[in-house]
Image (cartoon, grey):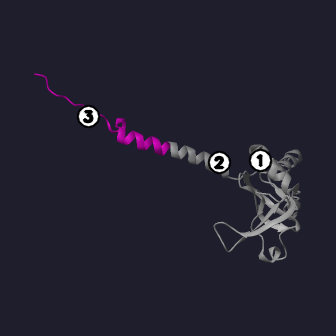
Amino acid sequence: MSENVTEERPWYKKKRYIIPGALLVIGGISGAFSEEEQAPTETTVASSDSSDAAAAEEIEAEAAPAKTEKAEKPKAKPKAKAVKVNAGDMIKAFEDNELAADDKYKGKTIQVSGTVDKIDTEVFDSSKYVLRISDGSDFAFLTVNCNDMSKKELSTLNTGDDVTAVGKFKDGGDLGVELKKCKLA
């Protein structure tokens, strides 16, 4: 008969020691690299040679921003000009090709002109009002809807008035065009 001989492996060859050990080593290596990337670089000058000192000062000047740059305030970006459009033309663009119109107006500020079709409450929030601008035709079904307007501005308008409003393009499609954060121009 043969005997079952099980050889005991040394501790350093067992999975329960190898895997955690490898993870510790990998974690230590990646931690060393991340500390190295985050640590500021310092330049030291050991030589009294004037060319070495000048080179070290040049390196330090490149590494650290100049004090005068810190004092300057960053310039404000100029506001993008609003895209001027007639309500009828904008609605027609969405009727013809919604994809092209979405691409044309996406992310832009729109200045839309037309006729006040109606001042109505929002569908899901009756405490907010929407200015609906059309091309002025008698049978206009679709409108450019200006949302987020103040009640004070809206109270000055009447159906049939010529109006110009500025707002951020939100969406366009089968139910008209939606603008948000609108104000009268």
Q: Which mark is residue 36?
A: 2
Whether 14 is among the magenta residues is: yes
Label 2: element kind? helix
The residue segment tinted magenta is: 1-25
The amino acid on which the numbered mark 2 sits, given as a three-letter code, is Glu
- Point 88% across, 68% down: residue: 161
On the image, the x and y values in percent for residue 30 come to: 57, 45
Q: Nearer the viewer, residue 171 or 77?
A: 171
Q: CA distance from mark 2 to mark 3?
A: 42 Å
Q: Which mark is residue 95?
A: 1
Are there few (<14), some (14-19), or many (20+) residues within 10 Å of tag 2?
few
Q: CA distance from mark 1 to mark 2?
A: 58 Å
Q: Quadrant of residue 185?
A: bottom right
Q: Is residue 98 visible?
A: yes
Q: Is residue 46 visible?
A: no
- Relative to 5, 116 lies left or right: right
Residue hosting label 3? 8
